[in-house]
Image: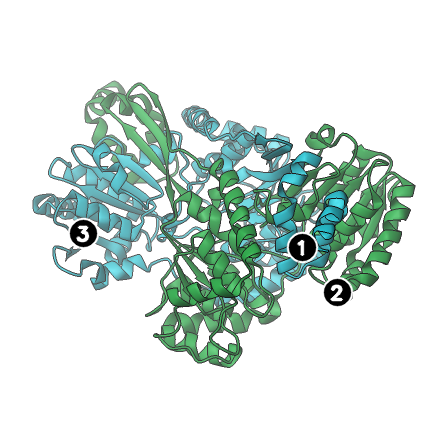
Chain colours: A green, B cyan
Amino acid sequence: MKVVNLRKEGWKREPELVRIKNRGQGLESKFAQSVLEIIENVRNYGDSAVFSYAKKFDKVDLTPENVKVSDKEVEEAFKKVPKEVVEALKFAVERVEKFHQHQKENSYFVTEPGIVLGQKVTPLEKVGVYVPGGKAAYPSSVVMNVVPAKVAGVERVVMITPAVGSLEINPYTLVAAKLSGVDEIYRVGGAHGVAAIAFGTETIPKVDKIVGPGNIFVALAKKFLFGTVDIDMVAGPSEILVIADETANPDWVATDLLSQAEHDELAGAFLVTHDNRIAEETVKAVHEKLKRLKRKEIAEKSIENFGTVFLTRDVYHSCQVANEIAPEHLEVATKEPFALLDYIKHAGAIFLGHHTCESLGDYVLGPNHVLPTGGSARFFSPLGVYDFVKRSSVLYVSQEGFNRVSGPARELAECEGLEAHRLAVEVREAIKLVAKSLERV
Amino acid sequence: MKVVNLRKEGWKREPELVRIKNRGQGLESKFAQSVLEIIENVRNYGDSAVFSYAKKFDKVDLTPENVKVSDKEVEEAFKKVPKEVVEALKFAVERVEKFHQHQKENSYFVTEPGIVLGQKVTPLEKVGVYVPGGKAAYPSSVVMNVVPAKVAGVERVVMITPAVGSLEINPYTLVAAKLSGVDEIYRVGGAHGVAAIAFGTETIPKVDKIVGPGNIFVALAKKFLFGTVDIDMVAGPSEILVIADETANPDWVATDLLSQAEHDELAGAFLVTHDNRIAEETVKAVHEKLKRLKRKEIAEKSIENFGTVFLTRDVYHSCQVANEIAPEHLEVATKEPFALLDYIKHAGAIFLGHHTCESLGDYVLGPNHVLPTGGSARFFSPLGVYDFVKRSSVLYVSQEGFNRVSGPARELAECEGLEAHRLAVEVREAIKLVAKSLERV
């Protein structure tokens, strides 16, 4: 791990900090043209385009008859997954559901004489959840993407996940889908799968929003289809930043740093501390533990690319550094973590105290583990129930209410040169208008 | 206006309805390459790229000294705008602010033994508001984009608007900006202006989110920069749908339809009614009023392209048709409009009753007039305070709380093959773990 001293004037311009701060700015336009072409073909040719891309990219023969996963396959999956895992998933679903219930929003209105104004909150009708295929399955990710949609009241949650090489879908994925409340599953993926649920095909339904992680083709397809459907945030490599003081346990902190590093060669693991001993011992522990990990090669590259210790003046300075980086996961491994909560402005999730390790939050605590990466915690939020509802404004005026506001509306329509806007007000205020023109005579 | 009869089986497949339903699906990829190039250049060369694009596209000589609008210019603007307009804008700002105050959200938390979970709500730090340049100014649009950001608590609202041909900015825009609480104004626009505030340059600050309408170049730049910054929805041509029963006033309805048609040749104006007389008289009134409008040519083309009357069986059928179209503005010009509120699922804003014309909402009622277009009311919401805050999850467990949830977390980490995730739990449950391994012996 690199050690970077920020105990100096102009620390915000320190090149290593700036490099990390700008980690999320990639545009990745080199695949843009091929993804746009896939989207166009799926839009124009529906199933036949989707099935031919599945043949080409995923080496699988899809038909209108086999593209949808049957109830029987889901039942079979339950026989293949160990009972303890099913129980652990049920535990997770229950806790995630319980926490997300608190995010439900009411429609509301306010009144004044002759006027009622408000917003009506309505669940989205149909949501698509993308789940990556392949041998590694992340059932916890299925839970985190699906449960908030069901809590919001979404009627149809449609999961897509690519069958690769054979028609079989990972049983862990199917079990998690069933336990989370997925309504339908289609074995398609990639940019063509995303385009299929964005436009709808002969066999695959059109949805209103697409969420869930995927590779660069999936991410680009979602971005290009933003507007045709809504999408969740743009996901990048995972990252953790730990603020530690002298009370932290270097062994625990090191394991937490590695639990991000093992995800991805581009994952970020940052330690921010004013305590030199903690810095040294943590770095040592990281390198020792690293050697023994099964996913050693990935974790090693990640630590090499982005593993950094920032030395600060005190915990408040550490919070400032954390805000500059705006990490996805932020652990506050200090004696009085709640004392720092106001100072932390930008982080996807804030884990307070020595026992609150990120992996508890990843799986079972309840808040969502789909979080903004690459510094986008400055403006994006964790996935939540609020992502699966939309609002409609509601406006009502009586004749009395109308009279109270019509004058300035007419004035502004006039000044913007929008004549029919003005006329729409004037036809309704005929009596007042006659009075006004008399005045002008 | 076309008249389309939907009083039949399979009305959802009626070609004219399907055409209107699919109105928002354009991808507009033909300018993609040039916009990507502009973005790349601004990212790499900052001000010098921005100023050279301003010279090329807007015929204006910008320098680090003149790019920012001075306080003096804003003061001067107030002398050029009629007093009544200033007063009307103040009235609008006050009402918009009052309504949006109700959208503020609290941070919240929930507890259980040894566990605290919640979300911290934080305003975005810096927001960019795009305001189109040119001779026509829409000060109401400035109000609607800026006020929710200020209500949310955004510290720096940075407006950009292109100076075209000369350095002068429309005084109505400047007055509206000042009254709404804009903090800084830069006279740049186009894709290069958007890229400038997304990345920041030597003279123009980097923001966290960009909102506001613009031409196709601005829209594409925002879309491509989504992720680097957050953006608001993708705006398309404006549209209105009126549900009318026999109590509607055809003259009023016609004016409301025209108040959308006058915006844009691609604007949509739809009447949905079960009453033949209302249909006939409204069509007649539209064509008569059309001839007398100053913006006749635009309105005529719009009515030709998208002006449609849908004949339905009853008001409930009318609501279904409205839901299929998911219009930006929906007027319910019926005897008992509140009786239909539950049936309306998809609309940006719902105007209830005969007096509630859309142009009142556009200017002064209080709810936002930045609304989802092109059918995206299925999943997007009006611009609001919620667009200018972000959430961070907050998690805390004590040793007790940790013990209550650590088992299933370990199980799931194990099943996903993420060893360090499992270790992060295990190092903290050393005691429990020893017990568990003894059990296994």
Which disc number belongs to residue A294? 2
Q: Where is residue B429 in the image (x, y as percent from the top left)?
A: 73, 44
Q: Name which quarter of the figure residue A206 lies in.
A: bottom left
Query: Mark 2, mark 1: which one is toward the viewer?
Result: 2
Q: In which quarter of the image is the C terminus of chain A?
A: top left
Q: How far apart are labels 2 and 3 at the CA level?
A: 66 Å
Residue at the left extreme? B277
Q: What is the three-letter code of the residue carrying label 1?
A: Ser
Q: Name which quarter of the figure residue B57 lies in.
A: bottom right
Q: Position of residue A396 (x, y in %)?
A: 29, 30
Q: Position of residue A413 (x, y in %)?
A: 35, 35
Residue that label 3 marks: B309
Relative depth, front residue between B210 and B323 = B323
Q: What is the three-letter code of the residue carrying label 3?
A: Val
> Eyeballing the image, is A201 above or below A141?
below
Q: Name which quarter of the figure residue B368 lies in.
A: top left
Chain letter of the residue beneath label 1 in the structure image: A
> SS for tag 1?
loop
Relative depth, front residue between B264 and A225 = A225
Relative depth, front residue between B425 and B117 = B425
Which disc number belongs to residue A70? none
Chain letter of the residue beneath label 3 in the structure image: B
Left or right of B24, for residue A39: right
